[in-house]
Image (tube, grey):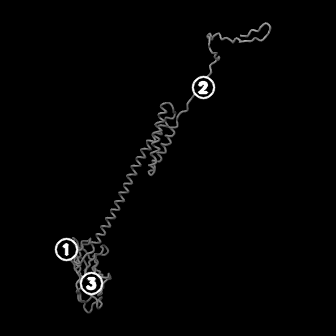
Amino acid sequence: MTTPVPPDGSTPTGPQPQDHDPWSPPSQPGDVPRPPYPMPMPIQTSQPRNGMAITALVLGLVGVVLGLFIILFWMSWLPALLAVIFGSVGLGHARKGLATNRAMALSGLVLGIVGLLIAAGSAVFTVVAVKHVVDSTRAKVKEADEAKESAAAAEKARHLSFGEPYTFGNGLKVTVSKPTPFTPDEFAHGHDKGNKAVQVTVTVVNTGTERIEVETGLPDVNDADGASAELVIDGSGRQKVITGYVLPGRKAVGKYAFSLPPDAARRIEVEFSPDVARWDDAYWSGPTR
C-alpha cells in the first residue's frame, strides 16, 4: 500500500498509515505493537556431571594397586572407601540423567569394594603373620632358656661329692670313693719325696641290658690349687685300671694312686668318664682327710 501524495506535491506530515495485514486480528485500544515475527529464545544446555565417576574409577584403581602390596595395605583402604562413595554418587547422577558415564561409575564402585576386601584380607594376613613371628620368637627364646637351664642343671648334676653315684647316658653308674692314704714303695714312679700320696677308688656298675666297653679307664686328679696331680706307679700291684667290657648287672673297680704337693693336698677333685668322646666328665671333690 502506498502513501497518498497531496495535489500540490508537498510532503505529508503527521502519523503515517502502516501496512495492514488482512489476516491479523483486529487491534484493540491499548494494544502494544508487536514485531511481525517472534524472537527466537536461546536453548540452554547443561554439561554432564561425569567427574564423580572418573574420580571413583581412579581411586578404585589406586586402592586395588596399593592393596596388592602387603606392606601398603594400611594406605589402600582410604582411596578404596572414597571410590565406593564417589561411585555411588556417580551412579545416582547417571540414574537422574545428570551424567553419561554410568559404566565408569559402576567400575569405580566395584574396584572400591574389591580394594576394601583386599585391604581387609591384607590386614588379617599381616596380623596373623606378625603373631606367628612373635610366637615363634617367644618359643625359640623359651627353648633357649630351657636349654640353658637344662645345661646348667646337667652341669650341676655332674659335680658331686665323694661317694655319690652318677649315671652316664650309656647306663654306666660310676662312684668315686673318698681318697685314702697311699704309701708308695721304694720303686714307685711319679712320686716326689715329701709329697702326699692318696689312693682313689672308682666303681663302675652296668645298669643296662647290654655289655658296655669302658674306653677311658683312667681318672684325672686335680689338687687344691687346680693343678694336675701325678699318677703314681709302683710294683706293689695295688693299682688296678678298668679296661674292657662291663657285663649287664656287673661292676668293675679301678684303684689309682696320685702324688700331691704337701701345700695343696688338703682337697682334690677327680674327673672321670667311661668314654670322653661321647660323655662329658663327671667331677667328684672333697677333702683328703
Q: Residues within 10 Å of mark 3 (few under 14, many from 20)?
A: some
In the rendered image, which quarter is residue 21 located in? top right
Residue 25 point in image, percent of width and height: 61, 10
Please determine whether, in this image, residue 85 is positioned above or below residue 282.
Answer: above
Instruction: Decide which of 39, 94 is in the foreground and name it.
Output: 39
The kind of residue on which mark 2 rests is Pro
Q: Nearer the viewer, mark 1 or mark 3?
A: 3
Q: What residue would you read off at disc 3?
A: 266
CA distance separating discs 1 and 2: 121 Å
In the rendered image, which quarter is residue 209 located in? bottom left
Q: Residues within 10 Å of mark 1 (few under 14, many from 20)?
A: few
Quarter of the figure with the N terminus: top right
Q: What residue would you read off at disc 2?
A: 42
Residue at x 48% of width, y 37% of height: 105
Q: What residue would you read off at disc 1?
A: 249
In the rendered image, which quarter is residue 268 located in? bottom left
Quarter of the figure with the C terminus: bottom left
Which element carries disc 2, helix, strand or loop?
loop
Instruction: Decide which of 102, 6 is in the foreground and name it.
Output: 6
Q: Residue furthest right?
A: 8
Whether residue 19 sits left or right of residue 10 in the image: it is left
First in sequence, mark 1 or 2: give its number. 2
